[in-house]
Structures are given as structure tokens and as C-alpha cells.
Image (cartoon, helix red, strand yellow):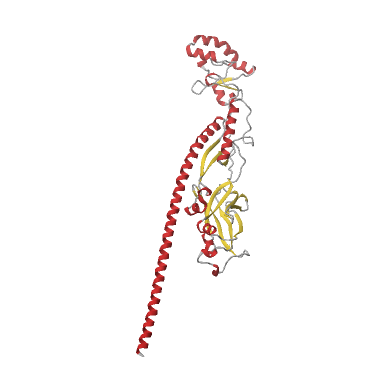
Amino acid sequence: MKKETEKQKLEIEKREAEKEFKEQMARYEAERLFKEKERERMQKEVQEEATLKRFKEQEKIHLEHKLAKHLSQITEINLIAKELEREIVFSIKLVYNFVSGAELQLFGGEKSSKTKIQVFVQNKETNHQYIWSLSKFNNRYFMIKDLLEAHYEGGQLPRNNTPEDPFWDPPEARMIAQGFLCMESLGYLIDNPAELHLVTDSGTIGKLNVNLVPLTENGEPMNDDDDIIEDPTELLNKRLDFAIVIEDGELPEKFCRDTYCQYSLLKDDSSFEIYKTNIVQGVSSKPEYRYKKQHSFENVTERTLNYMLNHNLKIQLFGFDVIEEKPAVVEPKKAVGKKGPKGLAIETEEEQSGAKGEENEEFTVKRHGLTPVNASNTEQQQKEPRRATFAVNTKLAPVTSLNPAAAQQQKPAAAAQKGGKDNKDNKDCNIF
């Protein structure tokens, strides 16, 4: 009996020891797997950082070459616009595409859109703004140079702000801002309602209320908590349906006319398809899009899964600027007729009929040898038709009203008395 009892104790101890050994080995294996995953994650992060750094260096070199070429062309076009007396200003605009190292590894540096160089055109004549691509700018560059040659040759130029005018473009929608929505929640079949901030190069200018909703094949939302998964790899080789919802937004008052949203989504054949919301007509700083579109991945692959877990859905806002009408500017009356010598402008009878003209009639332009007008000359002047007179520069003597007959009699005597520069001025000045 004792032997059997001892034997049973030994077996129990053996089983407990084996069990403890197995548990310990399982812990060691779990730790090993955890450390291995951590090592792989760190290696992946290092690779992503290296890829991103290499991409930025290549992008910098590529950008410098392009800017060196097109900045000189921009300067030349601005000078031509001034020469043609056009109120149009050209400048360089850089459009940044925010990409992560994971996206670069997923799509490659060639497929990932780099920093784009665009040409920003500000037409002050029509108070419109255009965004030109480099290809469009290169085309217009040569057209504008041909226009300058025609101007110098005295040829007929097209009317300003018409389809024939290379400076002009019809108003078209341009990208106002963009926001980025994380798609990682789809990997766990969880919806992601968010207040998406719309950003530009100068900061945040508005927001959109959006959502990413996982659906069943029938298009019904997944409301059951049992549908939530803990490991995204469970979606591999399965169908995934989801909806992108864009409800409404808050936009700046200057950029809220005829707005709509646009985004692109990966398809099963690794290409991208562009989707747009409806256009909210008119000026609205709080547009309501009420957009909901169901999408599906027929067969979730590793590439598709990586796309969902590491990619941000870019939603772009397009629209038109709100044009502010310029107040009417009353231009001052210009002198009528030909210019006189030494900065003198010929004035008409209408311009001489003001109060200043009446006061100045008592004086003469002594610089040109003229004498005061007496009463008899004034009566004679009223009978005779009024002739054009000279308006002298403010640094000289006041404007006078001349009697043609008296002036013709006094001119030879005055010219004989004066010499040098004054005599020269008198010869250049023709008084009718």
C-alpha cells in the first residue's frame, strides 16, 4: 500500500512538474513571439523612416530643378504683363501631398503623388483667381510671348478677358482645402464618426462632419458588438462592405460658393477611382451635402488590408471664390487736347469755367512775357470765340485766361526783352 501511495504521489508530482514546465515553455514562447513582433515592428519603422527620408531627399532635388526652371519664366511673364498694361500677377504655388512611410512602401515613390508645382494667377481686372498646371502654363507662356511680339509689331491684339486672351480663363472650381480621415477602424469593423478639419498651407479653415461605416452585404449598418473583430487578418479573403458619409460642414465665407467634396478610393485592381458629392449651389458657409456612398472590396487581400490600416482617406473640398464687387471709382477729369511744351497741358473752355479759373484770370504768366488782361480785352474776348489756353505746372505761375489779340501784339516785344532759356521757351510755346 505504501509503495502504491508513493508511486501515485510521484506520478502526481510528475504531472504537475510537466504541467508547470509546459506553462513555463508557453510563457517563454509568448515572450519570444512578442519580442520578435516588436523587433519586426521596429525594423518596419526604421525602414519606413529610411524610405520617407530617401523620398524627401529625392523630392527636394526634383523640386529645386523644377523651381529653377519655372521661377525665371514666372518673372518674365509678370514683366510682359506690365508691358502690356495688364493687371495680372503670376506666382508659384506648392501643393503638398501628405504621405507616410507605410504609404510609400505600399504604393511606391513613383505612384505616390509628389509635391506639385502649380501657377497661381490673380486676375485683378475681373477679380478672379486661377490655378494653372505646369503643362498649361508652358502652353500659355509661348502664347503670351507671341502676344508681346504682336504688340511691338503694331498688330491687332485680342480683347482682354476673352477666350482669345491667353491671360484669361473662365472661372472654374479649385481645391480650397483638404482633410484626412483614418481608415484603420474598418480593419476592426468599427464605424468612425469624425469632425474632419479642413486644412490648407496656412492652417485650418473649416470642418466637415463625416463617417466611415462598416456594412453588411445588404447595406445595413453593423450594430451588433459581436461583429467587431480583434484581429484584422480575419478579414483576409472575405468580402468587406462599408459606406463613406459626408453630412455637412462649416466653410470660410470667402470660399463657399458652389462647393462639393471629392475623394479617391482603391479598387480591387489596385487602381483608384474618384467620387464626388453633389454641388451645393450658391453661397453657403454651412453647406449640407447629405452624401452616402456604399463601397465594397470583393476579396480583401494583404494589400487591401495594409491600405485600410495604414492609409488616410483624403477628402478634398472644391468650390469658387466669393467675388466682392469693387466700388465704383470716379476718375478725375483729364486734360483734353494735345500736350503743350515743358509739361503744359492744353485746357478747354469747360475746364477754365471754374472758380479757380476765374480768379486766375487776373494774373499773367510772366515767364512767357504775358501782361494782365484789361476790361476792354475782356469784352472783346467775350465777343470772340474762346480759344484753348495753357495750364502751367503748380511750381510756375497761376493759370491765366488769354486774349488772343493782345497776346499776339505782346509776344514780339516780350521775346525781344528776354533771352537765354526764357527766349527758348517762348519759341517752343505756340499761343493761338
**What residue is drawn where x is 57% and y is 10%?**
409
Q: Is residue 147 above or below residue 239?
A: above
Q: Is residue 335 visible?
A: yes
**Considering the image in quadrants, where does the N terminus appear?**
bottom left
Would you identify the image quadrant in which residue 27 lies? bottom left
Is residue 305 placed above or below 377 in the rendered structure?
Answer: below
61 or 180: nearer the eye? 61
Which residue is more in the foreground, 262 or 172? Answer: 262
Residue 314 on image: x %, y %: 54, 53
- Residue 248 falls in image quadrant: bottom right
The quarter of the rendered structure image containing the C terminus is top right
Q: Provide residue 383's location: percent of width, then percent of height.
A: 64, 17
Q: Looking at the picture, does residue 351 appear above or below residue 77?
A: above
Query: Is residue 99 shown above or below 25?
Result: above
Q: Residue at point 54% right, 34% down? A: 77
Give coordinates of residue 35: x percent, y percent. 40, 63
